[in-house]
C-alpha cells in the first residue's frame, strides 16, 4: 500500500522553490533533473489536492497555498534534521575522527562558527582542519587525506561530488585615500587592466575573478599573497586595490577603513560548496556537518 505521506525529497523541492524562485533551481540544488522535479511536484499536488506551483513562460513560482505548505514543509525538514542529528550522536563511534580541508575564505570566516555548533552536537568527534586553497583541497580529497572539503572555486574537480552550503560575493576594495573612491564606477575593462593584489594561482577567489573577467586581458598582479588577511592588510596600508570576499572585509567596510568600489555591470556572486570523493551519498560525521550547515542556512531564511 502506498504511503499517504509525502517524501522528504519533494518537501525539499517545494522549500527550494520558495528559497530560489524557480523549480529548475530547486531541482539543481536537490541534484534532481527538471523533468523529475516537475513530476514530483505534480504528484504532491495530486496527493494534497492543492495547486502548489504556478507554471508560466518565465518559470515557476509558489501559489498562495504552496507558500503555506512550503512554510510547514520547512518546519518538518528542520525537525527531521534534528532527529537525524540526535540519532547520529547516539550512534557515533567515540573514536570517530573528521578530517577537513577548507579553502581560506571558508576556513577563516565560516568554519569556526560551523565547528563550534558541530562540537555541541557531536562532542566526541575529533576534528582536524587544514586551511589551503581550493586546488589543494581537491588534491587532499583525491589522495584520501581528508574526509570532506569546502571550496569557493567556480569549478569542481572531475568526479568529486559537491553540495552548496553558502554563498558570498566578491567586491573591489581600496583604502579611503585611493583615487577610485572619488570617481564614477569602474568598467570591467579598467579593473582587468589594473595590477591588483591577488591570491596565489589555485585559490578560489582568484579563479572566480579570472572567470568573471574572461574576455578581458588582465594585467600582471601587483602582488601575490597567500591569504585574504594578508591582502586585506596590504589594501589597508594603501599598497593597491584588491578583489575580496565580503566575508573577509565586512568589518573594515563597516568602520570605513576600506571602501567598496562599484564596477559597472560586474557582480561576482559565487557558491561555497562542500566537496567529497567516493559514494554520492556521503555518510558519517562529514554528512552530519553538511546537515548542520544546511539546517542553519534554512533557519536564517524563515
Image (spheres, rainbow, N blue to C red):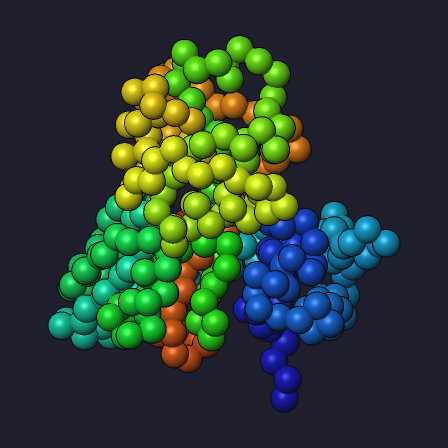
Percent coordinates x, y for residue 108 in the rendering = 29, 43
Residue shown at 48% from the left, 72% from the top = 158
Q: Looking at the image, which is closer to me, 219 or 151? A: 219
Specify whether residue 292 is in view.
no
Name, please, the residue furthest toward the left. Answer: 95
In the image: residue 74, left or right of residue 87: right
Question: Image quadrant of residue 118?
Answer: bottom left
Residue shown at 29% from the left, 67% from the top = 140
**What is the tally of numbered marks visible in this picture?**
0
Question: Quick one: quadrant of the N terminus?
Answer: bottom right
Residue shown at 27% from the left, 74% from the top = 144
Question: Image quadrant of residue 253?
Answer: top left
Percent coordinates x, y for residue 90 in the rendering = 24, 70
Specify whether residue 29 is in view.
yes
Asked if 170 appears above or below 95 in the picture, the reply is above
Residue shown at 38% from the left, 54% from the top = 202
Asked if 274 appears above or below 109 in the picture, the reply is below
Name, please, the residue furthest toward the bottom. Answer: 1
In the image: residue 247, left or right of residue 285: right
In the image: residue 260, left or right of residue 19: left
Q: Looking at the image, which is closer to me, 260 or 279? A: 260
Percent coordinates x, y for residue 222 in the rendering = 38, 33
Q: Looking at the image, which is closer to me, 77 or 141? A: 141
Q: Looking at the image, which is closer to me, 6 or 18? A: 18
Asked if 229 appears above or below 135 in the picture, the reply is above
Percent coordinates x, y for residue 98 in the rendering = 23, 66
Asked if 232 appears above or below 70 in the picture, the reply is above
Amino acid at each position: 500500500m502506498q504511503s499517504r505521506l509525502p517524501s522528504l525529497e519533494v518537501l525539499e523541492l517545494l522549500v527550494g522553490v520558495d528559497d530560489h524562485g524557480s523549480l529548475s533551481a530547486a531541482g539543481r540544488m536537490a541534484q534532481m533533473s527538471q523533468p523529475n522535479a516537475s513530476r514530483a511536484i505534480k504528484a504532491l499536488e495530486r496527493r494534497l489536492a492543492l495547486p502548489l506551483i504556478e507554471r508560466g513562460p518565465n518559470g515557476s513560482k509558489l501559489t498562495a497555498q504552496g507558500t503555506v505548505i512550503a512554510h510547514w514543509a520547512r518546519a518538518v525538514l528542520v525537525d527531521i534534521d534534528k532527529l537525524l542529528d540526535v540519532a547520529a550522536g547516539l550512534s557515533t563511534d567515540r573514536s570517530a575522527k573528521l578530517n577537513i580541508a577548507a579553502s581560506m575564505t571558508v576556513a577563516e570566516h565560516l568554519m569556526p562558527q560551523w565547528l563550534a555548533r558541530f562540537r555541541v552536537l557531536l562532542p566526541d568527534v575529533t576534528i582536524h582542519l587544514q586551511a589551503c586553497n581550493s586546488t589543494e583541497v581537491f588534491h587532499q580529497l583525491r589522495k584520501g587525506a581528508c574526509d570532506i572539503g569546502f571550496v569557493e572555486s567556480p569549478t569542481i574537480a572531475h568526479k568529486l561530488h559537491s553540495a552548496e552550503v553558502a554563498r558570498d560575493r566578491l567586491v573591489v576594495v581600496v583604502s579611503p585615500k585611493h583615487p577610485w573612491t572619488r570617481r564614477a564606477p569602474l568598467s570591467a575593462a579598467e579593473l582587468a587592466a589594473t595590477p591588483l593584489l591577488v591570491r596565489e594561482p589555485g585559490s578560489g577567489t582568484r579563479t572566480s575573478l579570472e572567470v568573471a573577467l574572461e574576455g578581458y586581458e588582465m594585467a600582471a598582479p601587483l602582488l601575490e599573497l597567500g591569504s585574504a588577511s594578508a591582502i586585506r592588510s596590504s589594501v589597508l596600508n594603501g599598497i593597491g586595490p584588491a578583489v575580496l570576499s565580503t566575508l573577509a572585509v565586512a568589518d573594515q567596510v563597516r568602520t570605513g577603513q576600506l571602501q567598496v568600489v562599484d564596477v559597472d555591470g560586474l557582480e561576482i556572486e559565487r557558491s561555497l560548496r562542500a566537496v567529497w570523493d567516493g559514494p554520492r551519498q556521503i555518510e558519517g560525521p562529514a554528512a552530519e556537518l553538511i546537515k548542520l550547515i544546511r539546517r542553519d542556512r534554512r533557519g536564517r531564511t524563515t
